[in-house]
Each structure stands twice: as C-alpha cells, then as structure tokens.
Amino acid sequence: MKKKTVFHGVLTATISCLLLTGCSKTEPPDSGQIEAVATIGMIADLVGVIGGEHVAVHGLMGPGVDPHLYKATPSDVLALQRADIIFYNGLHLEAKMGELFEKMGQTRMTVAVTRNIPETMLLSPAEFEGLHDPHVWFDVTLWKQAAGEIAAALVEKDPEHAEIFNTNAAHYLAKLDELHNYVTEQALRVPEGQRMLVTAHDAFNYFGKRYGFEVVGLQGISTEAEAGTRDVQNLVNLIVDRKIQAIFVESSVPIRNIQAVQEAVQAKGWNVAVGGELFSDAMGDAGTFEGTYIGMVTHNIDTIASALLGSARHE
C-alpha cells in the first residue's frame, strides 16, 4: 500500500452512514459544555487545557494506539454524531477520515489544527509522494500554532467564554515556550556528531530539523509498510559505520523490527543499546505526566539525550 495513505482508518458502515444521511448531528444530553472530538491524544490534550471546564473532550485514539492503523469503535461513532466541534490534525494524517470531517463541516464546526501553518515550514519527504509530513507536534514552535487554532475555534463556538479560552491559551503558550527552551538545552548536551535518532518509523523529522538531529526511521513515515530486508541491512550498516550509541522503540509501534536491527548490529561486532521507549503517534497513559503533550515531549528528549550520551549503557 502506498505510504501516502498514512492513517489506515477503516471506516465502518456506521461512519459511512453519517455521509449518506448528511452527517446529521445527534444531540447529547445538555451539559452546558461544548462537545468536542479530537483525533490524536496530543490534540485532545490541547483542547482540554484550553477549553477547561467548558469543553467535554472525547479523544478517538488513546495511549499506545497507532493512528496509522486506527479503526473506529462504536463509542467513537457516537461521539462524532454528537460533536459540536471536531478537531483533527490534517496534512493527510487522517486520510479518509479527514475527507469525512470536511463533509461533516456542513453541519458542525470541523478544524484541522495545522491548517494555517505556512507551507514553507512543512516538510515533504520524497517517500511521502508529494504530501507533507503530518507529525508537526514534534516541533514545539509549530505546535504553538495548533494551540492558537484551537483557541480561536473555541472562541468562535462559544464567545461567551472567550476570555477564559484566551487566558488558558496564553498560559499554555508560555509553558510551550519553556518546553521549547528545555528541549533545545537538552539537545545541545549531545555532541553534534552523536545527534542521530534511529527509531521504528520516521515520525521525528520535525524534531530533527528544529533541534539538530539526523533522523532515520526504519519504516519511513507510515507504519503501514513493513521494513524489508534491504531496509534493515542498510540501517545496520549505518549504525555500525557511524558507531551509533543507541536506537529507540516507540510506544505505538511493535518492537520486533528494532530488536532485529539490534541483533544484526551485534552480529557485526557493534553493541548498540535500545535507548528506551519514545512516544511518537500516541502519548502515555491518562493521568500520568507522559499522558500530556508537555510530558510526552519532555520524556522523549530526556530519554534521547541520556541514551546518546551513553549514560543508559552504564547504569
């Protein structure tokens, strides 16, 4: 399957019926809150922080869920039917679901949170067949723009609470500035020649560009395509030649391919560590620090810096 079909969401018959019936809205019990649906956890987190008590958020994809392989559940379908507003990433992350959201925009507000990021700031790897890399959340400065989109949409939807939404957004944007500075500082701890990030799939290009890392993903941008023998061998040779200290697994991607790479590297006489687990397309468990966007990014940079500096190999 072509890699540009990134979000392999299988549309159930019930979701398809939303289109056939004109995407009519099913009214939930009146709670006085905006009923919002967000696709990925990073967006749901933003909506919850900015909306506060005035927004009820239903996230479609929870911890450990690979959005490239997502399948809608009955509760997801019901949430979509009841939604006052739908937030999604855009940039073809949601593929066919994105088309559905655009059509549902005839009866309710739908917002692609990346829609106003300048095209000059988007990455378009050749293997992505003319489309943009959707993983913009790994550049904190770009994710600030997503926060602004969400705040503006909530203000438009519920102008009565505009001051609260704008205040919440301003406070959060300040925290994102602090996060960006922290990631930058941690990245600079790693000598430039050691800043190579090898992961299961190529979700970290924006991170690499912003924070100075060379990024290699075994499966490319989409997790749909299995890594072939040649892909594995090329990566193994790169790790051995460059004497890379650590490679990383991802919470939403099976570990087996990275383990195969590690074993093949060891067979060539170089001992590369699995430096830890990174969050890529999904955050950590709800109620934990890693279950927030800020916690997810903090965990990632701490794990990366520690492993590439070699401390993970000497504990």
Image: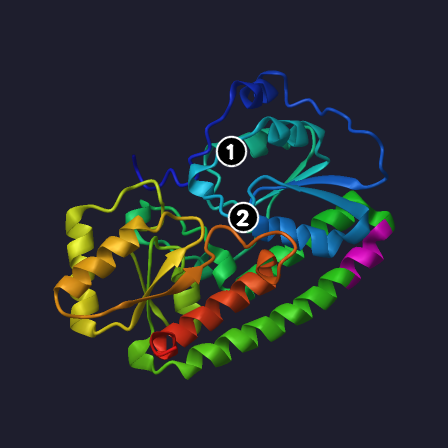
Q: Is residue 154 magenta?
A: no
Q: Residue 308 sits in which quadrant?
A: bottom left
Q: Please name whichever residue, 169 or 57, is drawn nearer the observer in this view of the structure.
A: 57
From the top left corner, tell me how far across and down residue 119 is, in percent: 46, 56
Q: Is residue 75 left or right of residue 221?
A: right
| Mark 1 Cα-neighbour bin, 10 Å: few <14, some 14–19, many ≥20 | many
Q: Residue furthest front?
A: 315
Which contiguous range is marked in magenta? 161-167
The residue at the point 21 percent across, 59 percent down is: 263
Q: Please name whichever residue, 166 or 80, is drawn nearer the observer in this view of the structure.
A: 80
Task: Assign the C terminus to one quadrant of the image.
Answer: bottom left
> Magenta: predominant secondary structure element?
helix
Is residue 218 visible in the rendered image? The answer is no
> Dot 1 lies on which element?
helix
Numbered label attached to residue 63: 2
From the top left corner, tell me how far across and down residue 120 is, in percent: 44, 60
The residue at the point 38 percent across, 61 percent down is: 205
From the top left corner, tell me how far across and down residue 236 is, in percent: 18, 61
Q: Is residue 165 magenta?
A: yes
Relative vertical location of residue 183 with respect to residue 276 in this rendering, above or below: below
Earlier residue among tags 2 and 1 = 2
* Mark 2 → mark 1, Cα distance in angstroms: 20 Å
Relative vertical location of residue 111 with respect to residue 287 in this rendering, above or below: above
**Which residue is the site of mark 1?**
97
Question: Label 1 is placed on what type of residue?
Answer: Met
Question: Label 2 is placed on what type of residue?
Answer: Pro
Task: Assign the N terminus to one quadrant of the image.
Answer: top left
The residue at the point 44 percent across, 57 percent down is: 122
Relative vertical location of residue 109 with respect to residue 216 in this rendering, above or below: above
